[in-house]
Image (cartoon, helix red, strand yellow):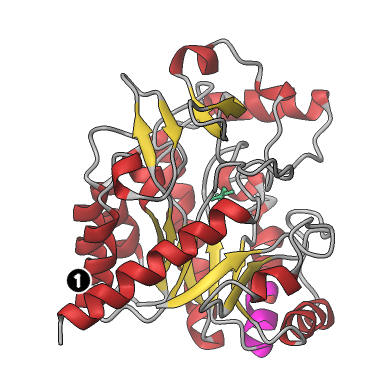
Amino acid sequence: MQMSFRWYGEEDPVSLDYIRQIPNMKGIVSAIYDIPVGESWPLEKILELKQTIAKHDLELAVIESVPVHEDIKLGKSTRTKYIENYKTTLINLGEAGIPVVCYNFMPVFDWTRSDLSYALDDGSRTLIFDEEAVSKMDPRTLSLPGWDESYTKEEMKHLLDDYKKIDEEQLWENLSFFIKEILPVAEKAKVKMAMHPDDPPYSIFGLPRIITDKQALNRLVNLYDSPYNGVTLCVGSFASDPKNDAVEILIEMLEKGRVNFMHTRNVKLVGGKSFQESAHLSQAGSIDMYQVIKALVNHNYTGPLRPDHGRMIWGEEGKPGYGLYDRALGATYFNGLYEACLKANG
Ligand code: DNO
């Protein structure tokens, strides 16, 4: 397991200098943020990012994400050019020696929460998803780190209208087309693709969502039979649907050799589909993190893992979910579980 940390580039209030001081920190998960979705990423820009990170004795381990243009998800005829651009980006990433690309296939909106600064009893602040609040939300007024915010209100309306014609099966067809186009290129470039599950893993705002459970992951990995067609096993995303057993999903994908990237965060289910993002500790939420790390150790997982989302603690302010302190505590906790599991195996 390669311990990693997400970094949002020079604009990130959490500096590489600080990240490097977290014990066992090796990898950086980042992206190029100033290229519009759908355009290809030039090799020079990728190399520049890689060198900035290397200067701090860290390694650019994963690109999260290379976003997929909506025309690809919608299966529009214009997808051809965007798929070609995606391939060029993968070739350039391969050339720069970047081993893993995280991406997702969620229509319009990426991860979604109803409150980004909910006060927990201990005075920390966290991200929550309240089913009822989300049902009343206007998606156009919400924004989260990593979301594409380049749409005008008018464009957004058209986009949402376009999706009225796309049901889940159609979305699967469009995903299948995309996978079959890009995977041979990713294989040749030696870049492992890692599909992030939908977060949360069910339809929101009436939009279809398909990467939601174990069955869906199996369908995805069967679309193209190669270790390069893998997943980002985000245990927190899966566990936010009470129907999913995140550990069971993880083990199945490890057995198939398709886990290319790990996201570890905990969620506390609080009734229905509502949840709060808790501290990483098993007792704080609904996921048994010992079982998660044990599964990784038992399957000799050597890929990157990042402690996902942290609460805001000790008065820290910053990007919701992406402060320094609680994520660093998460990293230290996972280091401890990892060492214990490894040594228990002798
Ligand atoms: C949220 C993240 C997501 C993730 C993308 C991957 O914190 O887990 O934004 O980066 O969905 O493509």
Residue 266, compared with residue 252, is above or below; it is: above
Q: Is residue 32 above or below residue 128?
A: below
Find residue 290 and report its horizontal and vertical position in percent. Answer: 25, 59
**Predominant SS along the magenta part:** helix
The x and y percentages for residue 35 are 82, 60
User: Which residue does the image show at 62% across and 41% down from the upper left?
Assistant: 312
Is label 1 in a helix, a strand or a loop?
helix
Residue 296 in the image, given as x and y percentages of width and height: 28, 71
Tell me if 77 is positioned left or right of 216 in this view. right
Q: Which residue is mark 1?
A: 255
Q: Is residue 35 above or below residue 46?
A: above
Residue shown at 78% from the left, 77% from the top: 49
Asked whether mark 1 and ligand 1 are closer than 8 Å, the reply comes as no
Residue 184 seen from this side: yes
Amino acid type, callout 1: Glu
Residue drawn at (26%, 74%) of the image: 340
Magenta span of residues: 89-96
